[in-house]
Each structure stands twice: as structure tokens, then as C-alpha cells.
Image: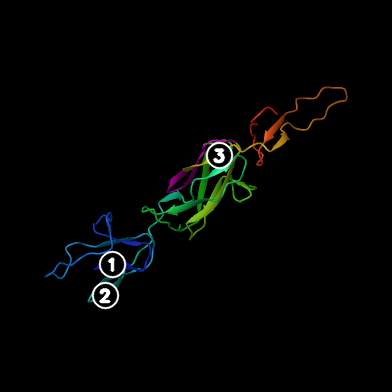
Amino acid sequence: VNLTANSATLAFYSDPGCLTAMTSIYIPAGYSTSFIGVYFKDSAAGEPTITAGATGLTSASQVETISAAAATQLAVASPAQTVNAGVCSLPLTVQSRNSGGAPTNVAAATTVNLTANSGTLTFYSDPGCAASVTSIAIAAGFNAVNVYFKDTVAGGPTITAGASGLASASQSETIIAAAATQLAFVTKEQTVTAGMCSGRVSVQAQNSGGAAANVTGAT
């Protein structure tokens, strides 16, 4: 007996813990039912139709109801990134999920606080990294929101997203030192009296993102 469903997220299992996936069962000769039980699990809310079919027999279908479980945790849904120092990242997606790990809409707008273990990493609400933020919000009825980040120092910072009532999520990123492409004065402009020596003036090699970058040879 072949088992199918019109939900791409529904799977069948042979055990009550839904650990061993299966796509068919068999009814032994001389019997009317299978010795093996069938269980199913769907990660998306809806009303999937499951169908049992076998050669020579009329198929049977049944509509099930999958209700949405409440969100219990946050997850970083986008992959870890490798970003040049001083350059804006790609979108980092924070998602609300239920205990089974399925994306789950929040009932009310949910503030997500953003932290990192790097003192030089900053979060932004826009892809140009112009508007810095320390929190973002998942809108009511939705399950995800994007944020961007930029770090001026090479390393492996860990980003953490946390919200009240939801388990936090963390992800480690990689910040690499890009090659030096420009010079910049890193000391402020001065007003000096004629004939007097100025304060120290410092020149720094930087990458295209404006982060300090070591030169490969004496320059």
C-alpha cells in the first residue's frame, strides 16, 4: 500500500515517535489490515489530504488537520557568512519557530534584541549599513525579519538574537581582513598657530570598506 499526501512537508512514519520514515506498508495475504501502524507528521499548518493506494484496489483518501503550534524559539535561518572587514553583510534572517523547528508566525509583534561578542560589530536595518539598530521586530502574523551587520576587525564574532518568551539563537560569522586599497587620516583636523608644531598626525592604510588593513610590505 503506497502512501502519499498533497503536502510536501508531510511525511509518514512506522513508529509513534515519528523517527523512521516510510512511504508504504503491506497487508499480508489472508488479512485485511497491516501489522505495521502508520503515523504522519507535517511541519506546516493546513489541511493535507493523505492517500493510500494499491494495485487492483480503489484508493482511499482522508483530510487531516494540522494546527499551528506556538512559537517557542528563534533561529538564524540564513547561512553563516564570510564578510570583509568594514563591508556590509548580506541579509541575516532571524526566524520564529515552534518546538518542532517549523517556521511559526508570531501572534503579536515581537522585538528581537541583537548582540555580538565583538565590540566592533554593529547591526543595521538596511543593506547599505547606514541605519544602525540594536533590535528588530518580527511583525504580527509573520515569522521572519532581516538584519545586516558590519565589523571593522577581522575575527569570528558570534551573533545572538533573543526575544522575551523565546529561546535565543546564535550564529558565528567570519570577518576577514581585506587588502589595503586606500589611505586615510585617522586624526582630527587641527588649528595650529603659525610657527608652532602641530599635534601628531596619523595616516592609516584601510580596505575598501574603511577598516584598518595591514600592508603586505613596507609602504
Task: Name the side, left or right, on which 5 lies relative to 93.
Answer: left
N-terminal-most mark, 2 or 3: 2
Q: Which residue, given by chain and number where applicable, does mark 2 sit on? A: 59
Q: Earlier in the sequence, mark 1 or mark 3?
A: 1
Which SS class for mark 2? strand
Percent coordinates x, y for residue 78 in the rendering: 49, 50
Magenta residue span: 153-170
47 w.r.t. 139: above or below: below
Q: In this rendered view, identify the residue nearer to me: 139 or 50.
A: 50
Rendered position, 35 above or below 90:
below
Amino acid at the residue labelled 1: Leu
In the rendered image, residue 144, in percent from the top left (x then y), is placed at 49, 55
Can I make out residue 122 in this image?
Answer: no
Q: Position of residue 129 (x, y in %)?
A: 63, 47
Q: Residues within 10 Å of mark 3 (few under 14, many from 20)?
A: many
Residue 213 shown left or right of residue 5 in the figure = right
Mark 1 element type: strand
Q: In the rendered image, which quarter is residue 219 located in?
A: top right
Q: Is residue 166 magenta?
A: yes
* Any part of residue 13 in sight: yes
Question: Which amino acid type is shown beneath numbered disc 2?
Answer: Ser
Give me the C-alpha separation between circle 1 and circle 3: 48 Å
Dot 1, how many residues are within 10 Å of its Cα: few (below 14), some (14-19), or many (20+)?
some
Q: Separation of disc 2 and disc 3 at Cα?
A: 56 Å
